[in-house]
Image: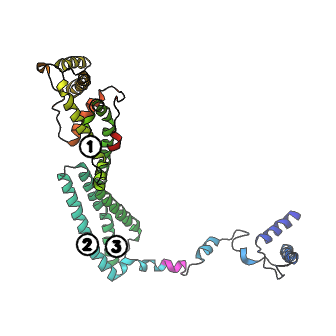
Amino acid sequence: MAREWQAHRRDRLSRHTDPTPMADPDHPEAWRAELLAARDAVAAGATAPSAHRGITAGRHRPGLKDQLAAVGSYIPLAVRAELAPYRYYAHDNMYAAYLTLYVTAYTIGEVLLARGCWRLAQRSKRTSVRVGLRVVALGAIVTFGYSGVRTGNVIAGAFGMSLAGWENFAWTCGDVGAMLTLIGWLVPTITDQAKNVQYRLRQYLSYYRLRRLWLAFYSEAPEIRLPVDQGDPARSRRFRSIGFKLYRRAVEIRDGRFVIRQYLEAGVRESSEAHHRVRGLSGEELNAAVSADQILAGIAARKTGERPHPNRLTDFADTDPETSQPMDDIDALLAVARHLPRQRARTLHPERAFA
């Protein structure tokens, strides 16, 4: 009996919300005494529980979820379901006429866009342009799903039917098609920017990798350094660009080669070629390795002042490299630099002040 009474008491209190006491809030003892008295009355059955928690607490009530869903809705659910077919936009005659014109023009434009982009993609020689145009064409084709559903809405409305269930499919086709179209237009631009970044990075790496070859010439012939007038701010900014620095370094290296050209002896070239052929080098790599040996031998001969006999003079092994782009000449110099030994400069060099 005690257990049943305790369960009954807990049920009543769980469905009860304490009312605001009539006592003065500035007197906590009276306020608390009134609250406890109200709870004891509810627990003893002398007073009914407050109804504030009656809908969410206590025993399970069938239909409670439906009652909660209806709370706050200004239109009953049954009425909303009956009005749903008439709220669909395709049943409005004026809007259906406008939708017909809009979808027709939109579909014609997408057909022309897909057809034109696909044809131009076949003619372009640039891979990024071909890929971008085909992505645009694919996006235009995907949007046909949006146009089809909109056209079907108008036709179904004329027969008193509705394609409201296809709305998600229509919007998906429209959104995905528009996204693909934008991505397709951006592909060539993004590719070009990526190539520019790659080219600029390649210039930086080439500039620092040529330092070893530049130091070899500058240590023996400091006069190869080109003077730069930095008085004009506009010109000064241009001189700080990596393109100018790299071009200047290549020119100074070429001047250094010209300085020691009169010290190149044919025997050095012949012995170097024989040595590197044994190592398995051939072609442009062989010429680069031989030119590196010639540079070291020419610098040493210039130090001692010993010039070879005119009949024994020769030229660099890589005198006539095949170049078709600006960076091809830099690549030829880099090939020579790779075969030079790492060594510290023997002459102080102010390259960092202007280079």
Pick the residue in front: 351 or 231: 231
Q: How is the image coloured?
A: rainbow
Gap between marks 1 and 2, in whole Å? 68 Å
Which residue occupies 36% across, 77% down?
A: 90
Q: In the structure shown, which secondary structural element does the residue marked by tag 1 occupy?
A: loop
Amino acid type, mark 3:
Asn
Please identify the dominant SS of the magenta region. Answer: helix
Q: Quadrant of the N terminus?
A: bottom right
Kindly identify which residue carries mark 3: 153
Q: In the structure shown, which secondary structural element does the residue marked by tag 2 occupy?
A: helix
Of circles 3 and 1, the one toward us is 1
Gap between marks 2 and 3, in whole Å? 13 Å
- The crowd level at tag 3 (other Cα within 10 Å; few <14, some 14-19, many 20+) is many
Which residue occupies 15% across, 32% down?
A: 320
Of circles 1 and 2, the one toward us is 1
Of circles 2 and 3, the one toward us is 2
Residue 49 image offset from top left, x and y in percent: 79, 76
For residue 284, say whether it is visible: yes
Give the magenta range: 75-81
- The crowd level at tag 1 (other Cα within 10 Å; few <14, some 14-19, many 20+) is few
Residue 316 image offset from top left, x and y in percent: 18, 27
How many marks are shown on the rendered structure? 3
Residue 263 image offset from top left, x and y in percent: 19, 24
Amino acid type, mark 2:
Thr
For residue 330, say whether it is visible: no
- The crowd level at tag 2 (other Cα within 10 Å; few <14, some 14-19, many 20+) is some
Seen from this angle, which residue lies furthest left? 311
Residue 32 image offset from top left, x and y in percent: 85, 74
Kindly identify which residue carries mark 1: 227
Kindly identify which residue carries mark 2: 104
